[in-house]
Amino acid sequence: MEGRPIQDMFQAIAPRYDFLNRLLSLRRDVQWRRVLVKALRVPRDARVLDMATGTGDVALEIGRRKGISVTVWGVDFAFGMLQLGKNKIARTKYCVDIRQAQGDAFHPPFKPGGFDAVTMAFGIRNISDKKRVLKVFYEFLKKGGQLLILELTLPKIGFMKNLYFIYFQKLLPVIGKILSGSSGAYSYLPDSVRKFPSQKDFCELMREAGFEKVSYKRLTLGICTLFTGFKPENKA
Ligand SMILES: C[S@@+](CC[C@H](N)C(=O)[O-])C[C@H]1O[C@@H](n2cnc3c(N)ncnc32)[C@H](O)[C@@H]1O
């Protein structure tokens, strides 16, 4: 799946998206986004592009930790997800400048070279040409800017792998289908995680796209991974 079918899928599950995220991950997703935002190294008046922003949880977490001086642009191609995010942003008690734009990850509606950081949580899995989209992120970062990507990955430890398989491949699609009303979305999820490259291979793709100081951190025994890298200071 790619492009329009993905857009339609997220459009359809948008109303149940946050609820199912919290339930199916046992609220780990909240913690994982916190780890991402903690790793964000930006100046006080930074501009951050949160690509595939969905219902805005990364943008809101940036607001919670970094506050008023940061501007976050949340971009997503599913209008329904942005709409839910808009309501959450309107209700937030944190003073942060969060703006939204509907758009595709390959064509962010901005001038290149204007962001101190690009973040993407649980979005890269949905994009087949990962190297091309990483190059787009590189292009939209300022020199020295940081890329942070959070993604679901396969656990490394043996016993966890078996448990994970039973839960993720068997139980989750059934629970997801019942609660979201979408037959495809929660079967697609384990499939897309299985097809995601290994941590080392994804780091290599980041390097090939031009990033340096590339590293990754396994979270919750590896069922989620945070990838980070920087655009070199001395290259356009
Ligand atoms: C699993 S959700 C993640 C949302 C959010 N980042 C979070 O942490 O909950 C994936 C999001 O990526 C968006 N998305 C997928 N492919 C995209 C693309 N090519 N361009 C823009 N948005 C995309 C979907 O619409 C969806 O909102």
Image (tube, rainbow, N blue to C red):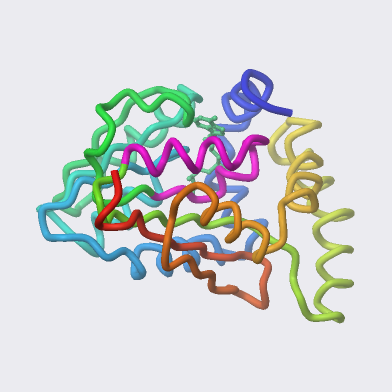
Left or right of 109 in this view: 160: right
- Is 75 a magenta residue? no
Picture layout, residue 122 above or below residue 101: below
Report the residue at 15% width, 60% height from top: 43
Quarter occupied by residue 6: top right
Quarter occupied by residue 156: bottom right
Majority secondary structure in the magenta region: helix
Which quadrant, please, contains the C terminus? top left
Report the residue at 79% width, 32% height from top: 184
Q: Position of residue 130 (x, y in %)?
A: 60, 41
Q: Position of residue 155 (x, y in %)?
A: 74, 71
Q: Magenta region: which residues?
A: 119-140
Report the residue at 30% width, 50% height from top: 235
Report the residue at 74% width, 51% height from top: 193
Q: Position of residue 24 (x, y in %)?
A: 67, 56
Picture layout, residue 170 above or below residue 112: below
Q: Position of residue 152 (x, y in %)?
A: 64, 57
Left or right of 194 in this view: 139: left
- Observer-nearest of 178 and 111: 111
Please, which residue is most extreme toward the front here?
234
- Is 129 a magenta residue? yes
